[in-house]
């Protein structure tokens, strides 16, 4: 069955708007002209403060506890994505019932089983993308833990400042990369929630996608948490 036999024009346009909105939001958040005002970049500066404080600390049990918390949070979201993927595959067996339920809603006309299945597979793809992002972030946080262990203690850092600075920069860069992938995975979950609007109708998808972008944009640039770090 060809794609034009599954998606009519409104559904196709809504899907393009969803993908375009996700890409555009990611581009704006990571664009250098605006990134310095966002939560992600502000937290990156705090990561550097953390690493430099770590370098002067005699005991680093606090830092290992922080890294354990980062890994646990990442592992939780990765596990949640696995459960979500399993749930989507379970729903594939009920595609006909879902189509019948949604057809009764006033916002949607005909709703074929093939369209429901295609949308569910799209949702699987989103959560699979998020899982791989979280899985890679978990591994990078693990690497970061090793790099933190390689940072010289304070006495050694005073004796060889260049070596200590190079070790600090390696750990800091790895931590930032891990955080970037974690943020991408979390963004995938948020847009996956917006994607659920498509099961009601194509224009609902456009509305829920716009709502997700507005919420994420506000939290990234104009929230109380952002002002706390500025």
Image: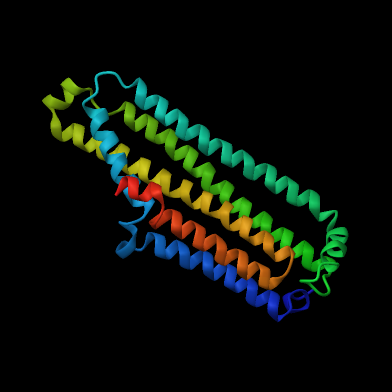
Q: Where is residue 1 in the image (x, y as percent from the top left)?
A: 80, 73
Q: Where is residue 178 in the image (x, y as percent from the top left)?
A: 42, 43
Rendered position, 198 above or below 80: below
- Describe residue 28's horizontal placement relative to residue 2 as left or right: left
The residue closer to the viewer here, 154 or 38, is 38
Rendered position, 18 above or below 87: below
| Residue at the extreme bottom of the image, as rendered | 9
- Describe residue 69's horizontal placement relative to residue 35 as left or right: right
Residue 106 location, quadrant: bottom right
| Residue at the extreme front of the image, as rendered | 224
Q: Where is residue 52 in the image (x, y as percent from the top left)?
A: 23, 34
The residue closer to the viewer here, 210 or 139, is 210
What residue is drawn where x is 61% and y is 68%? 207
Rendered position, 77 above or below 66: below
Residue 188 location, quadrant: bottom right
- Describe residue 160's horizontal placement relative to residue 11 as left or right: left
The residue closer to the viewer here, 7 or 34, is 34
| Residue at the extreme left of the image, as rendered | 159
What residue is drawn where x is 29% and y is 18%? 59
Residue 125 location, quadrant: bottom right
What residue is drawn where x is 40% and y is 60%? 29
What residue is drawn where x is 31% and y is 62%? 32
Q: Where is residue 44 in the image (x, y as percent from the top left)?
A: 32, 46
Colour pattern of the rendering: rainbow
């Amino acid at each position: 069955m060809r794609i034009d036999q599954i998606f009519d024009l409104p559904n196709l346009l809504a899907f393009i708007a969803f993908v375009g909105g996700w890409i555009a939001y990611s581009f704006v958040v990571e664009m250098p002209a605006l990134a310095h005002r966002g939560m992600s970049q502000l937290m990156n500066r705090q990561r550097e403060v953390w690493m430099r404080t770590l370098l002067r600390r005699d005991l680093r049990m606090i830092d290992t506890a922080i890294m354990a918390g980062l890994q646990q949070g990442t592992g939780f979201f990765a596990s949640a994505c696995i459960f979500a993927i399993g749930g989507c595959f379970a729903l594939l067996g009920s595609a006909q019932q879902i189509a019948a339920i949604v057809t009764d809603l006033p916002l949607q006309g005909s709703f074929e089983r093939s369209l429901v299945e295609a949308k569910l597979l799209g949702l699987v793809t989103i959560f699979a993308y998020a899982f791989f992002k979280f899985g890679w972030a978990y591994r990078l946080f693990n690497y970061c833990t090793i790099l933190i262990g390689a940072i010289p203690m304070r006495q050694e850092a005073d004796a060889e400042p260049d070596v200590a600075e190079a070790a600090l920069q390696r750990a800091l860069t790895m931590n930032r990369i891990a955080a970037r992938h974690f943020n991408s995975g979390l963004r995938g979950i948020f847009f996956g929630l917006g994607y659920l609007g498509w099961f009601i109708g194509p224009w609902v998808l456009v509305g829920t996608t716009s709502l997700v972008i507005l919420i994420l944009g506000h939290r990234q640039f104009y929230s109380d948490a952002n002002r706390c770090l500025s």
